[in-house]
Image (cartoon, rainbow, N blue to C red):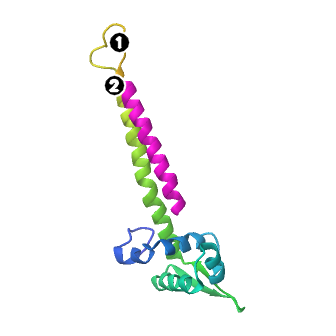
Amino acid sequence: MDPEDRGFPADIAKPIINQTRMKILKLLRKRRYNISEISKLLELSKPLVLYHIRILEDAGYVRRVENGRKWVYYELTDVGKAMWKWLRIKMIIPIIGGAVALVLIAISGFRRPEQPPEMGGINVLAYVSFFIAFLLLLLILIFYYKYKKKF
């Protein structure tokens, strides 16, 4: 199975459901780390970090890199990198869909009405639609930035 071409079944995604493992994956996408570095950065005990690393290693997302020295480093495998890309795409697609829907709502509010408003009147629906679309877009952006920090 090519992880970039297909969706991930539940049994493959199960090891990354834990927030600590997601944080470890987030760190490892940037560079190699050893257990001590991960432990300090995440403010977790070394045995706990090692426990989560082993789960990720067994799942095939992380591999050990021994360079003949005292330290053992860990890095993402190709499957781990593909999983990270998949997670990012899964997060961005709903945001793009929401933005497109908001634009369509805003545009529909500015359509020419079937009957012109009475003399001196204004098209309140256009302003209300625009205001609602603006608020929804603002909420989507707030959600995106809050959710983005977790990744």
Q: Position of residue 124 (x, y in %)?
A: 35, 22
Mark linked to residue 48: none
**Image-quadrant location for residue 128:** top left
Q: Is 118 displayed left or right of 42 in the figure?
A: left
Residue positioned 41% across, 30% down in the render = 130
Q: Position of residue 52 (x, y in %)?
A: 50, 82
Q: CA distance from mark 1 to mark 2?
A: 12 Å
Q: Is 71 displayed left or right of 18 in the figure?
A: right
Residue 3 visible at all = yes
The quarter in which the N terminus is drawn is bottom left
Check the image and name the residue furthest to the left.
114
Q: Position of residue 30 (x, y in %)?
A: 63, 69
Stretch of the chain drawn in magenta: 126-151
- Marker count (numbered): 2
Q: Amino acid at mark 2?
A: Leu
Disc 1 marks which residue?
A: 121
Residue positioned 27% across, 15% down in the render = 115
Residue positioned 35% across, 74% down in the render = 10
Disc 2 marks which residue?
A: 125
Check disc 1 and report its element: helix, strand or loop: loop
Q: Nearer the viewer, residue 23 or 85?
A: 23
Residue 122 vertical placement versus 21 (above, below):
above
Check the image and name the residue furthest to the right.
69
Main SS category, magenta section: helix
Check disc 2 and report its element: helix, strand or loop: helix
Q: Nearer the viewer, residue 25 or 150?
A: 150
Q: Amino acid at mark 1?
A: Gly
Residue 32 visible at all = no
